[in-house]
Image (spheres, rainbow, N blue to C red):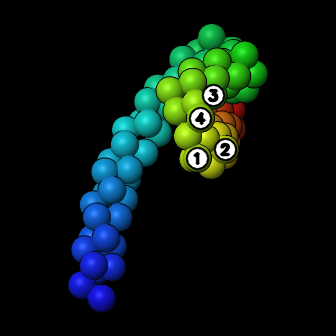
Amino acid sequence: MQEIAALRQTIDEIDKEMQRLFIARMETVRSIADVKLARDLSVYDREREIQVIAANLSRIEGSPYEEYYKTFLETVMQLSKEYQKSIVRSAL
C-alpha cells in the first residue's frame, strides 16, 4: 500500500503544478479577451485552435496518450473560450 500512497503523492504534486499553469493560462486568456474586445475580434478563432492542437499533438505523436491529450487540449480551449465570452458579456 506504501507504493500507491507514493504514487498518489506524485499525482498531488503534478496537480498543484497543473493548477499553477492553469491559472497562468487563464490570466493570459483574460489579456487576450481584453485585446479582442478592444479590437472587436471574435472569441473563436478556428484556425488558431487547429494550429495549437496540431503543434501540441506533433510533440507526442505515436504516444498512447495522444487522443487523451487532444481531448485535454480541446477541453482547456473550451474553458478558455467560455471565460473570454464571460468577459465580453460583462463588458457590454
Give whichever of discs 4 and 2 has the lower sequence position: 4
Q: Residue at x 44, y 30 (%)?
A: 28
> Circle 4 — which element?
loop
Residue at the disc numbered 3: 53
Q: Which is closer to the viewer, label 4 or label 2?
A: 4
Residue at the disc numbered 1: 64
Quarter holding residue 46: top right
Give whichever of discs 4 and 3 has the lower sequence position: 3
Residue at the disc numbered 2: 67
Query: Residue 14 got which mark?
Result: none
Q: Which is closer to the viewer, label 4 or label 3?
A: 4
Q: Which residue is drawn at 57% across and 24% down?
A: 58
Disc 2 from disc 1: Cα separation: 8 Å
Q: Which is closer to the viewer, label 2 or label 1?
A: 1
Disc 4 from disc 3: Cα separation: 15 Å
Q: Residue at x 64, y 18 (%)?
A: 51
Disc 2 residue crowd, few under 14, some 14–19, many 20+, Cα 10 Å: some
Quarter that holds the C terminus:
top right
Disc 1 from disc 4: Cα separation: 6 Å
Disc 3 from disc 2: Cα separation: 11 Å
Q: Nearer the viewer, residue 5 or 36?
A: 5
Give whichever of discs 3 and 2 has the lower sequence position: 3
Q: Which of 92 and 22 is in front in this view?
A: 22
Numbered marks: total: 4
Quarter holding residue 27: top left
Q: Which is closer to the viewer, label 3 or label 2?
A: 2
Q: In this view, does 11 lie above or below 71?
A: below
Q: In this view, does 8 lie above or below 26?
A: below
Q: Is residue 67 above or below residue 60?
A: below
